[in-house]
Amino acid sequence: MTRPIIPDSEFKERAGKVQELMKQKGIDMLLTYGNEAEPQFVRYFCNYWPSFETAGVLFAQEGDPLLLIGPESMTYASDRSRIKDIRRLSAFRESSNPEYPGHKLDTFNSVIDELLKGKILKNFAVAGYNLIGKVTFDALVEGLKSFGDVSIISGDDLVMQLRMYKSENEIACLRYAGEITRKTFDYVLENIRPGMTETQVRGLACGKLFELGAESESYPIWVLAGVGGNQAISRARHKVIGENELVHLQIGARYEGYASTIGRPVILGKPEQWMIDAIKAGYEAHEAIIGQLYDGNNAGNVADAYYETMRNNGHIDWLLYGPCHATGLMEGEPPWIEEGSDYILRNNMTYAVDIFMGNKQGYGFRIEDSVRVGIGKAENMTNYPCEIFRL
């Protein structure tokens, strides 16, 4: 595949679109905040992914935005950011809180004043509202004091109005990430063996996905064998994989910021009948969900098809949540599709079909693919086989 990228022109277009939304909503300034674990609100506007330190992009309703970084990251940020106007603030420093004596740093007061250009500031929005750390937030509050009575509100929904619908360049990056993930999953199936530890299998996956061009994992790759497979969020253990064990195998590659994912159960030996029954039930639900992911359909119909299928095949008590969450710059983004969802699906919304199944005995697995909502039908961007993997 030709290696796709997000061009500079698209980053500029995103900035213009969010400023138009700010005007419509009466938001005078917007700070998008990100950290190393969840960089999406920053990376979406400039491609910068902070390391150790945190970061933000500051917008007024008019003019070019500023990238705000910690004191140590100027050479790194200058190399990667599509926004070239960068300011260093101690509020974005690493958690060990060095003082950086002798360095002249900007403050929230100075950067806000620079962009505001004497205009009145009443409403200030923060995207990444549930991520921003207290030290950074306190510095923001202090910096806003000189501008009068300023209201600080969440800007997450404002930015997600843009991120929810993917461009053709974003779709190309998601497909590319899916191709890396698919090939990596093949490689792991070819090499996983009883006697290996879960962490060793994770190592197989990590090595291959980086070899194929991923910039990182989408999330810490999950390999959970036997009891403990019912952990919906987890990490690989030093547990040795035994003969005839059911393995919860979940692999995702991140490329150009965009996350892909494949989840499949794997049996290393002879399966028990309950394993076969549960896997077939999950695949049946997987097919029902993807059949509902088309432009113009109500998201609630997707959830209804999922739960009805699982009730009919007798595995409703295996479910924790479902059936989908959006995906893009993070493997898990809003909006979710779940019971009670009531909104219309549109072309180029992208989801992880995320079927997590676990029983009370401690066994479980996930069936997951990255899928694009399309006209008339969905596009499965990972499109991994739905079969009983017996190795």
Image (tube, grey):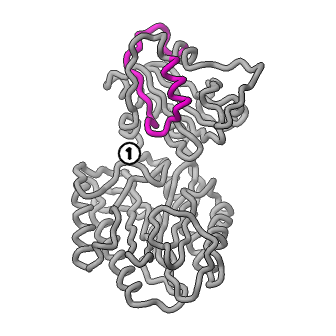
Q: Quadrant of residue 51?
A: top right
Q: Give whichever of 98, 73 is nearer the camera.
A: 98
Q: Quadrant of the C terminus?
A: bottom right
Residue reaching furthest bottom?
A: 270
The answer to whether residue 131 is left or right of residue 283 is right
Would you say residue 181 is visible in this rendering? no
Would you say residue 373 is visible in this rendering? yes
For image coordinates 64% across by 76% down, the residue present is 197
Q: Quadrant of the N terminus?
A: bottom right
Q: Quadrant of residue 353?
A: bottom left
Residue 116 among those drawn in magenta: yes
- Under circle 1, the secondary element is loop
Q: Give whichever of 172, 194 is nearer the camera.
A: 194
For image coordinates 54% across by 85% down, the residue present is 268
The answer to whether residue 285 is left or right of residue 42 is left
Give above or below for 287 relative to 269.
Answer: above
Q: Position of residue 83 (x, y in %)?
A: 59, 30
Residue 282 among those drawn in magenta: no
Q: Quadrant of residue 370?
A: bottom left
Residue reaching furthest right?
A: 102
Q: Position of residue 178 (x, y in %)?
A: 51, 62
Magenta part of the chain: 114-143
For image coordinates 54% across by 42% down, the residue present is 39
For image coordinates 62% across by 57% down, the residue present is 214
Q: Position of residue 244 (x, y in %)?
A: 53, 88
Q: How many marks?
A: 1
Give above or below for 310 relative to 142.
Answer: below
Type of residue at label 1? Answer: Met
Residue designated by label 1: 164
Give above or below for 247 relative to 56.
Answer: below
Q: Position of residue 106 (x, y in %)?
A: 63, 19
Residue reaching furthest front?
A: 361
